[in-house]
Image (cartoon, helix red, strand yellow):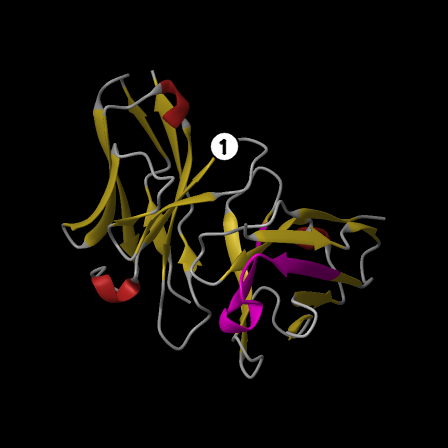
Amino acid sequence: QAVVTQEPSLTVSPGGTVTLTCGSSTGTVTSGHYPYWFQQKPGQAPRQLIYDTSNKHPWTPARFSGSLLGGKAALTLSGAQPEDEAEYYCLLSYPGALGGTFGGGTTLTVL
Amino acid sequence: EVQLVESGGGLVQPGGSLRLSCAASGFTFSNYWMHWVRQAPGKGLEHISHITSDGSDTKYADSVKGRITISRDNAKNTVYLQMNSLRAEDTAVYYCVRGGGAYWGQGTLVTVSS
């Protein structure tokens, strides 16, 4: 089973920009992995922010964007707000296998 | 409004069994794959199983293979997770997730302890 890697923790200043990344032990992450990004706050179920690399839901704040960057999937937060402090998980799909493997999560601190 | 409501969690002894249910509403259930994702206390998310829209194919994570069975009843808009031979490391919140990942239930806590 593939291993999906994320930064354990990142810190961003209010109003600042930060990029979270998501890598795969099998090699380059492509659009064929249909990268997903989820936000989870304490005591809540995860909420999907991004699907299929860069697509947003109506509830996704405009300051979040998804992309492929340097062989990884990336989630960029531009103009961080205090309410963005949360755990962020990526999910990559691997065809033929159990439909999706989560990364270990990134704890994002807005400070 | 899409709703997923899990039930069936609770305290069970090691080696015991439990069946989780997830009642779906607000969408055409039979059109979607369904997933179970769990989260141990203070840990990350683990995708443990999925089932195709017609129930013809299922997949399991290595950590639960042979001990867990996913099934669904499209007439009742419900997906199930039968859990056997439970271990302490199965203690977690279990989430039901609609295919695509946009909709999650509130989760049900399973605690395996003597």
Within the image, what quadrant is residue B15 found in? bottom right
Q: Between residues B49 and A82, which one lies in front from this camera angle?
A: A82
SS type, badge 1? loop
Q: Residues within 10 Å of mark 1 (few under 14, many from 20)?
A: some
The chain ID associated with circle 1 is A
In the rendered view, would you say A13 is above or below A100?
above
Q: How far across and down, in percent of the image, does residue A79 sit?
A: 23, 24
Q: Between residues B56 and A13, which one lies in front from this camera angle?
A: B56
Q: How far across and down, in percent of the image, does residue A10 sit?
A: 32, 29
Q: What range of the chain is rendered magenta?
A: B20-38
Say which residue label 1 marks: A41
Residue most extreme to the bottom: B56
Q: Between residues B68 and B87, which one lies in front from this camera angle?
A: B68
User: Magenta span has B29?
Assistant: yes
In the rendered view, would you say B57 is above or below B16?
below
B10 horizontally vs A20: left or right: right
Q: How far across and down, in percent of the image, does residue B33 sit?
A: 50, 69
* Amino acid type, mark 1: Lys
